[in-house]
Image (cartoon, helix red, strand yellow):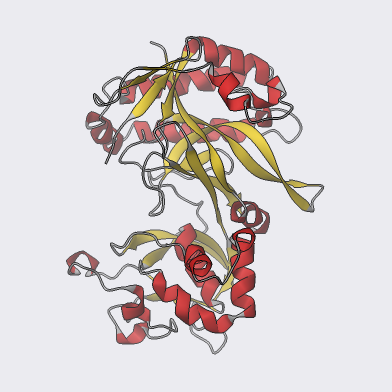
Amino acid sequence: MMKTLVLLSLNLGIALGFNQQLPLRLNAQPDANLQANQSTPNYEETSLGFDEQLWGKSGDKAAMLKSIDRSLSYLNTPTAIAVYQKYPIPSINRDRVRRSLVRFRQLVSTSRNAAQLQAAVKQEFVFYQSIGKDNKGTVQFTGYYEPIYQASRTQTPEFKYPLYKLPANFSSWQDPHPERVQLEGADGLQGSMSALAGNEIFWMRDRFEAILVQIQGSAEFNLIDGSKTTVGFAGGTNFAYNSIGKELAKDGKVTASQLTLPGIIRYFRENPQELDVYIPRYKRFVFMKETFNGEAMGSINVPVTPERSIATDKSMMPPGALALVYTQLPYVINGRSIQQKLVSRYVLDQDTGSAITGPGRVDYFMGTGKVAGDRAGVTGGPGQLYYLLLKS
């Protein structure tokens, strides 16, 4: 597994490979590269580091500052100290990541607009670019969210699909772990006859919604008794993530244009019998825990922030660090249609996921609820990922 980032100087346009097998290479000016595919580029909207979402009536500067503070709290933990002692790039260390966050927080607080922040960042920071999936910086983006569903604490004829807590003896399960179909059956209702028995914590009435809770890693529940609660990730079996949507596409059940979360949900609603065929192909089984109305948590044990948290492969990327994504993201226009917009967004690297492996994958946290889910379901495309660190 390659553990490498590429140092990108915004001023000189020189990329340096820290992996000894990678040679030095001369890049064109980054802004020119990023604008090359735009027919009518606008400098302010397409220039790297110009994040207009922080300002204005609907600006989320407060959320950005909160997300920074959460990363800073993580960096003060023994876990962070241990992780960064083993981080493979010596110039990226915990102290430098922490100081970079502190300074960036000051700049966000004092800058009057996006242009001023961008200028200060280019003056004081260097950008480390992910080599991406092709060793040329191309990163594939997806979106994730926290759904809101109805659920029950007890089994009923309507609410019959269970979610499970982590079994007490899970650490002693033998390898290879049982596949999903061995644990819950093809119909998802046979868990009482497997190692899952007795670990049911909630029941849901829609089987695919129960699967989405496992895939997204958190959810809010409106319970049938009128109360509310939340659940979060507690652990999972040792199978790699396998996309149900890609399985459908492989079998010709959906077209490329239908390969979105709304398209997949629509397919299963029209063909419910297919759930027993395709859900078992997702061999990994995920366990949940009740989090009692808590916020969705990232893998570094801090809450993730809508629009300001990302998930990456933490065996390669610096946890809690300040990053910048440059890609197309979907936005709701006039409360109705969703349109893609090319954006440059400052984010904090605070999460991971079983599907997020290698330097060429980023999952972008959209938030909670239906709108966030609609946006996450149509997020998917190439872009670039950078990490920002003070020059000294």
Q: Is residue 10 above or below residue 261?
A: above
Asked whether the viewer can see residue 84, the reply is yes
Q: Is residue 112 above or below residue 130?
A: above
Whole-percent x, y for residue 367 in the image:
59, 49
Whole-percent x, y for residue 203 in the image:
49, 77
Question: What residue appears at the point 40 percent right and 47 percent down from the top-left corner?
Answer: 352
Q: Nearer the viewer, residue 335 or 271?
A: 271
Q: Is residue 110 left or right of residue 164?
A: right
Whole-percent x, y for residue 122 in the image:
54, 14
Which of the 4 image quadrants contains residue 358? top left
Q: Is residue 16 above or below residue 173?
A: above
Q: Is residue 145 above or below residue 364?
A: below
Q: How many circles with numbers are drawn on the protein?
A: 0
Q: Is residue 111 left or right of residue 202?
A: right
Q: Nearer the viewer, residue 142 or 103?
A: 142
Quadrant (top left, top right, bottom left, bottom right) of the C terminus:
top left
Furthest residue in direction right, as rendered: 334
Which of the 4 image quadrants contains residue 317? top left
Asked whether the viewer can see residue 292, the reply is no
Furthest residue in direction bottom, as rendered: 157
Quadrant (top left, top right, bottom left, bottom right) of the N terminus:
top left
Question: What residue appears at the point 65 percent right and 26 percent down from the top-left corner?
Answer: 46
Q: Is residue 18 left or right of residue 138?
A: left
Whole-percent x, y for residue 261 in the image:
59, 61
